[in-house]
Each structure stands twice: as structure tokens, then as C-alpha cells.
Amino acid sequence: MAKITVEALHKSFGDFVAVKSSSFTIEDGEFFCLLGPSGCGKTTTLRMIAGLELPTSGRIFLGEQDVTFKRAALRDIAFVFQFFALYPHLSVRQNIAFPLKSQGMPRSEIRERVGEVARILRISHLLDKRASSLSSGDRQRVALGRAIVRRPKAFLMDEPLGALDAEMRHVMTGELRALHDRLAATSIYVTHDQLEAMSMADKIAVMNRGIVEQLGSPREVYDRPSSLFVADFIGSPPMNFLSLGEGIAEGADKIRLANGHVDAPRILEGGVREGDLVLGIRPEHLQFVDEGALRGVVFGVEYLGSAQIVTLTTPHGVVRARAPADRRISVGERLGLELRTDRLSLFEKSTGRALALARNGGAAHG
């Protein structure tokens, strides 16, 4: 396997810029996710790494080798597509063996490798069945097997679970990560599904409009989002944003929010002008209390079994909070909310960027 380095990668299609000067490193054996909404540039980035698209500028390294303008066939990578791209008239055995047969590998070695891959993917009992007769989940396993059997330097996967139903996606997510761990493979996985990325990735690159907005572990992008976009895109429900038109930055010392109700952690990077401040907090970092820093009226309650999501209207916008499943909450009820100040995020509304804060812990009180 190999380390993959992307340096200032840029791709334009006429006047449209699909990828803007993206740089990141994928370590040897790492499971790396490119995450973002449709049209953000994640698949274009993957295709450039694979050699299926040539960059307008920038460089791509596979190990120490510059492969920026090398054809896909010379990059020693395996690509798994969203749609299975199998030969329906061939058996599972023949589909998996196809790339090895094309390379002229001896039959005995092909047979050994196909058997090994089938055991890893638990499809040995399907080897003599036609691909067209398989379920969607089994066809995806065969597509993975055809990639694995080559033993490439890296695996590139473009939304490989997108065609599966929700239950099978959940199963295959766990199996893909377990497979990655067994093979110690370098893997790049493209998805728009944050749950897939959060559950599988060692590192995530969150993309938006061709730009890598944040690069980090699942915990980092969830706990410390670097922009309003990342905070809104990651999380279910996403982070709450409170409009603070009267928030006033007081130098670099501290910031007083919402008519003096909440003292946020100290800003480390200069001040913010009045009216250009957004407070962000995750639903699980709000606690219901009799009297709180924030008060709201219950607009809706979603019962999820293990918890419930309560939606409230407040003077600073709509807020969602997690509540215990056994607590009785009624629509129209007026409730107080306490905010964990050690888990607050602050953003500049004009730029969308997160502000660096000093973390002291505690909760906000009215």
C-alpha cells in the first residue's frame, strides 16, 4: 500500500471551477473519506487521483512517485464504482478473476487469489452463480472482490453503497471498515452520507464548492467545526445556530452574548464587530432547566425510542435539543435551556469561519 499526497489540485471545466487548490495527505493504510453534498468536487477529486481526469494544475503523488499525468492503468490503484459494473453473463468467479486474467496471470495463481478474496468477503458459496442472479449487497461484494484481487497500492471507492437500501448500507458499512482493517489498505471513499463517513473514516475531508473546508478526524470535524457549512452539514440533527445581532466583541478578552445572558469563552483571534456573530451548539449540549440562559416554546417533539428531539422557537431562532425518552414534553410548553459553554462554537456570519476560543468548561446560566 502507499501514501497519497495531493498538492494544490485544481480542476476547471471552461469557466466552471470544480476543485479549487485542494491539498491533503492520506497516510499509508488510512481510511480517508471525501465528504460533501452533490456537486462539491469530491468525485472529480477522486477521478483525478485515479487518473480518469487530468488536473488543470497541481500534483498527485502515489508514494514517492509523481503520477499527476500518468494514465490510470499505470497507477496501480483499484476503483469501485457506485453501480456495480459487473459482467452479468459471467459467474462470480469469472468476474473476480477478470483483471488477473487480463494481466496474463497463471491459472493456478488466479484460482488461489479468487478463493482467498471469496473467503474474505464471505462469498465462497456464490462463486459459480451468475452475477445477474445476485442481490444488490452480494453484487457489491463481488465488485469489491474484483478490486481486492489485484492487490493494488490503493482502493478508490465512489459512493459504492449508494445503490443499496438503508439496512444493507448499514451492514456493508461495517463490513467495509472490517475489510479495510484486515487488508491494512490505503482507501479513499467518496460519499455524501455523513453517517458513512463518521462511522468508517480515520480522516475526513469535508468539501464545499470545490474547496476542502475542513480536514480532520470524525471527532474533530464534529466537535470543532471550522466553518458554518461544516457545522451545519455534520450532525443529525445539525448544530443549532443562534442569531446574535446584539452580540458585541469586547477586544480579545471575552464576548457577551444575547443581552448579557451568556458569557462565552474568550476569543483568541482578535474581536468581532457587532452583529457579525453566530453562536453554535449541538442539540446534546443543551439541557432543560426551570430557568435557563435561553427560553423557548416547544414547536415539535420527535420520539426516537432512545431519545427525543425537541424543537423550540426562541428569540434567537429555532433550536433543537435532545431530551431523555421518558420525559414528558408537550407542544406549546415553555422551557428553559442551559448551554454548556465548554461546547459552544462561535462563527463570523460574514465569512462563515469559526473563531478560536479558550475553553474553560462549565454551563451558561441566566
Image (cartoon, rainbow, N blue to C red):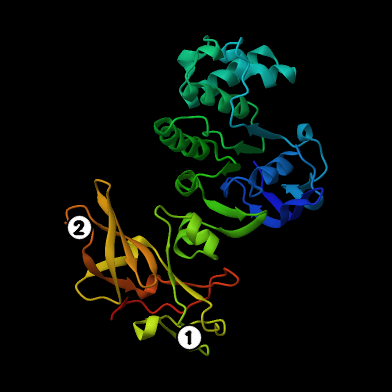
Residue 134, image x, y percentages = 49, 16
Q: Please report the residue visible at 46 percent of the width from the left and 79 percent of the height from the top.
A: 358
Q: Which residue is mark 1?
A: 248
Q: Amino acid at mark 2?
A: Ser
Q: Is residue 58 above or below residue 95?
A: below
Quarter-of-image position of residue 78: top right
Q: Amino acid at mark 1?
A: Ile
Horizontal side, residue 272 vs residue 85: left or right: left
Residue 135, image x, y percentages = 47, 19
Q: Nearer the viewer, mark 1 or mark 2?
A: 2
Categorize mark 2 by other alpha carbons within 10 Å: few (<14), some (14-19), many (20+): few
- Please say whether residue 80 is visible from this viewpoint: yes
Horizontal side, residue 209 vs residue 104: left or right: left
Q: Is residue 87 above or below residue 282?
A: above
Q: Is residue 332 above or below residue 363?
A: above
Of the 4 image quadrants, the one containing the N terminus is: top right
Q: Please report the residue visible at 43 percent of the width from the left and 57 percent of the height from the top.
A: 238
Q: CA distance from mark 1 to mark 2?
A: 35 Å
Horizontal side, residue 6 vs residue 228: left or right: right
